[in-house]
Amino acid sequence: MTADDMRVRSADGTGLVVRRRGAGDPVLLLHGSGGGLHSWAPVAELLAGRHESWMPARRGYHPSDVPSGPKSFADEVADVLAVLAAIGRPAHLAGGSYGATLALHVAAAEPARLRSLAVFEPPLFAAGHTLAPLLGRYRAALAADDQAAMSDVLNEVTRVPPAVVAAFRAAAGDRRPDPATSTGWLHDLEALTADTTVPASWSTITVPALIMQGADTWDPMPATMDALAEALPTARRVIWPGQSHFATMTAPGLVADALRDFWQRCP
C-alpha cells in the first residue's frame, strides 16, 4: 500500500483497498480479471489534472480481502457502493472487461449513485451456467497448483486466439502467476457462472453511457458489443482501429481522451 491508498469496508465486512490519484470530479475505475490497483494507472495519470480517480482492488485481489466463500456480482455491487459512500457524492463509473460487467450491474441497481457509466469490452459472452464445468476444472487445477491447467481453462473462458496465447506465454518465460491473482480469477469465475449472457437485460440502465472497444478484439467480442449497443440505444460508442482487449494499457491516451470527452457532455 502507498500513501494514496485507503481501506474501505463493504457491507459484509470485506476490506477493500482503494488507490486515489489526481483531483477534481471523482471517477471510480473498476479493473478486470487478473488485474488490481495498477490496472487503470496509465489512464488515471492522464486524468489527474481534472479528475480524482478511485481505483479499488476488487474483493479477491491483493491487497483487498479474499472472500470466505463463493462470490456473486451482488457482493461486488455492495463493494462499489461502499467505495461510492467513501467518495461522498455521485461519481462517474468506468470498468474494463470483467470490471465493465460489474459496472453494468451497478448502473442497473443504483443509478442515482452515478453520474455516468463507461464500459470497455465487458465479456458478456463469458457467463452463465455453461461455465460451470470450466469453473469446476479451474477450482481443481488451483487446488493442485497446476498452472498449465488453470491457463487452459481461462483461455477457454475468454476465447483468446492461440497466437495471442503463445505470445503471452513467450513473454512470461519462466515467471509463475501470482497465487493471489489465480485466486481472484476463481472468484470471478464463480460470479460469471451465476450471471446472465443476455445483453438486453441492460436495457433498463438510464444513466448516460459510453461503450468503448478495440476494432481488433477477437470474436465474439464485436458481436457482443453490437448487442450491448442495441440494448443501450442512447449510449455513445467509440471503436479504436488497431486496438484490442488491452487498450487501457496499450493506448491509455485514447481511453483517457474518450472518457474526458464523454464526461464533459454529461450533466
Image (cartoon, rainbow, N blue to C red):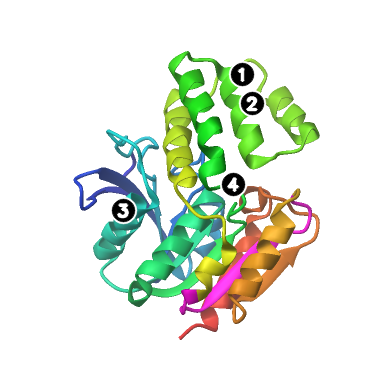
Q: Secondary structure at mark 1?
A: helix
Could you tell me if the residues under marks 1 and 3 are in contact, i.e. CB atoms within 8 Å? no
Q: Residue 204, image x and y in percent?
A: 47, 75
Tally the marks: 4
Of residue 25 and residue 116, the one placed in the foreground of this image is 116
- Check residue 215 for magenta coloring: yes
- Residue displayed at 54% across by 74% down: 209
Is 192 in front, or is 117?
192
Residue 63 is situated, as x and y percent measured from the top left of the image, at 34, 36
Disc on the earlier residue, 1 or 3: 3
Q: Amino acid at mark 1?
A: Ala
Q: Residues within 10 Å of mark 1 (few under 14, many from 20)?
A: few
Residue 135 visible at all? yes
Residue matched to label 2 = 152
Of badges 4 and 3, the one in the foreground is: 4
The percent position of residue 225, horizontal first and vertical second, equals: 67, 62
**Residue 4 can be seen, yes or no:** no
Which residue lies at the image location 50% right of the left edge and 82% below the top edge?
266
Amino acid marked by disc 4: Ala
Q: Which mark is residue 148?
A: 1
For the residues carrying marks 4 and 1, which lies nearer the camera in this image? 4
Instruction: Kindly identify which numbered label has been placed on residue 179.
Output: none
SS of the residue at dot 3? helix
